[in-house]
Image (cartoon, grey):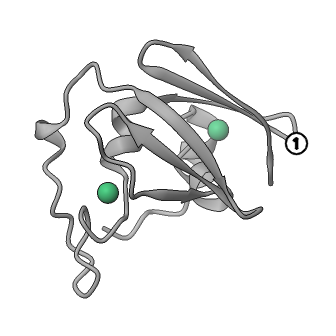
Amino acid sequence: MIPVEIKKSGPCELTVFWDDGHKSVFVIKYLRSECRCAGCVNEITGERMLDPQSIPEDITITAAEHVGRYGIRFSFSDTHSDGIYTWHRLRELCPCPQCRADLPSRVN
Ligand SMILES: [Zn+2]
Ligand SMILES: [Zn+2]
């Protein structure tokens, strides 16, 4: 699955349109809290070191950059820009009821 369009649909909201016609609407704070970079998640234990409470409610995305053909890197307004979100993961994170229902119970 590949996004055909990614756009900011509100001050704190990002919408991704997929090539299969699906649409994902993300609250940017949620995307930020799911960052898997070495600064946010311990590479060895997989433990999340980022406290979601510490993320400002009004966090937004200031820039986005394609990473190869497989993903995207967001720069967030809290100056964090290390997280790469692959298309696969972005789709996995889709918060819509349909995707939540399809998902096997998630580890961690
Ligand atoms: Zn991170
Ligand atoms: Zn979905």
Q: Nearer the viewer, residue 85 or 97?
A: 85
Residue drawn at the location 35% of the way across and 43% of the way down? 32
Q: Is residue 27 above or below residue 43?
A: above
Asked if residue 61 shows in the view, the reply is: yes
Residue drawn at the location 53% of the way across and 63% of the way down? 104
Q: How many marks?
A: 1
In the rendered view, does 75 fall on the left or right side of 7? Answer: left
* Residue 31 picture quarter: top left
Q: Nearer the viewer, residue 107 or 72?
A: 72
Q: Is residue 27 above or below residue 108?
A: above
Where residue 48 sits in the image (x, y, percent)? 21, 64
Residue type at tag 1: Asp
Residue drawn at the location 27% of the way across and 77% of the way down? 46
Where residue 53 sits in the image (x, y, percent)? 12, 38
Q: Secondary structure at mark 1?
A: loop
Of all residues, the one furthest to the right in this rendering is 20
Q: Which residue is mark 1?
A: 20
* Residue 61 picture quarter: top left
Which part of the image, by quadrant, shows the N terminus?
Answer: bottom right
Which part of the image, by quadrant, shows the C terminus?
Answer: bottom left
Q: Is residue 21 above or below residue 2?
A: above
In the rendered view, does 89 fall on the left or right side of 6? Answer: left
Q: Is residue 51 above or below residue 55?
A: below
Q: Quadrant of ligand 1?
A: bottom left
